[in-house]
């Protein structure tokens, strides 16, 4: 992971990259300081990958500001995406086509919240929800399958979860 003392210099350097199209951060603690990066007028940023990161609601609001994103990944997040955070992301990031929450959803994410992914993201094509056994249940999968996005999915990964053949 990134040392806390290195976060400010990292964020300052990222602000100097206006042509950035894709960003992968591993083990970075994200907080209100990410707001300056998100507002750096990245007109080309379409992919944001956050692996083993920590974040708070301020960071999630900054991510939601990146409305041009079509790919967003949370992979093995050290902080889990709560229902409130998920709602913030889904309400703003309407262009998302490829979404990953691998081992990254908090236990308060209900089946209705899972279904909101397929309701709010009308362009969704790829969805990775693996390793969220307390969230991806039969009920969550059934609700997700009844959403507008479900018939257009080309890739769905729900491995390592807690559902039965009823959910399929």
Image (cartoon, grey):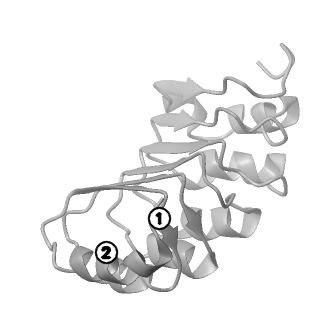
Mark 2 or mark 1, earlier in chain? 2
Check the picture and name the quadrant holding the C terminus.
top right
Q: Residue furthest left?
A: 19
Query: Residue at position x 82%, y 23% from top?
Result: 167
Q: Secondary structure at mark 2?
A: helix
Residue 106 lies in what quarter of the image?
A: bottom right
Query: Residue at position x 15%, y 74% from top?
Result: 18
Query: Residue at position x 43%, y 52% from top?
Result: 96
Residue 84 lies in what quarter of the image?
A: bottom right
Q: Position of residue 129 (x, y in %)?
A: 63, 37
**In the displayed structure image, the side of residue 39 where residue 61 appears, left or right:** right
Query: Residue at position x 49%, y 76% from top?
Result: 4
Mark carried by residue 28 = 1
Nearest to the observer: residue 46 or residue 4: 4
Residue 10 in view = yes
Q: Residue furthest top?
A: 165
Q: Are marks 2 and 1 in contact (CB under 8 Å)?
A: yes
Q: Position of residue 79 (x, y in %)?
A: 67, 61
Q: Measure the C-alpha gap from mark 2 to mark 1.
A: 9 Å
Residue 41 in view = no
Mark carried by residue 10 = 2
**In the displayed structure image, the side of residue 1 where residue 12 appears, left or right:** left
Q: Secondary structure at mark 1?
A: loop
Nearest to the observer: residue 18 or residue 64: 18
């Amino acid at each position: 992971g990134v040392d806390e003392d290195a976060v400010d210099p990292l964020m300052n350097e990222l602000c100097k990259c206006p042509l950035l199209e894709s960003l992968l951060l591993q083990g970075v603690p994200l907080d209100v300081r990410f707001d300056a990066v998100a507002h750096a007028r990245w007109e080309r940023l379409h992919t944001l990958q956050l692996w083993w990161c920590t974040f708070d609601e301020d960071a999630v609001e900054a991510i939601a500001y990146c409305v041009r994103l079509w790919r967003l990944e949370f992979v093995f997040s050290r902080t889990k995406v709560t229902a409130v955070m998920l709602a913030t992301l889904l309400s703003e990031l309407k262009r998302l086509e490829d979404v990953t929450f691998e081992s990254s959803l908090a236990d308060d994410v209900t089946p209705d919240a899972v279904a909101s992914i397929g309701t709010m993201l009308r362009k969704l094509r790829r969805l990775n929800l693996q390793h969220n056994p307390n969230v991806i249940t039969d009920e969550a999968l059934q609700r997700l399958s009844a959403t507008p996005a479900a018939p257009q999915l080309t890739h769905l990964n729900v491995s390592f979860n807690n559902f039965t053949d009823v959910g399929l």
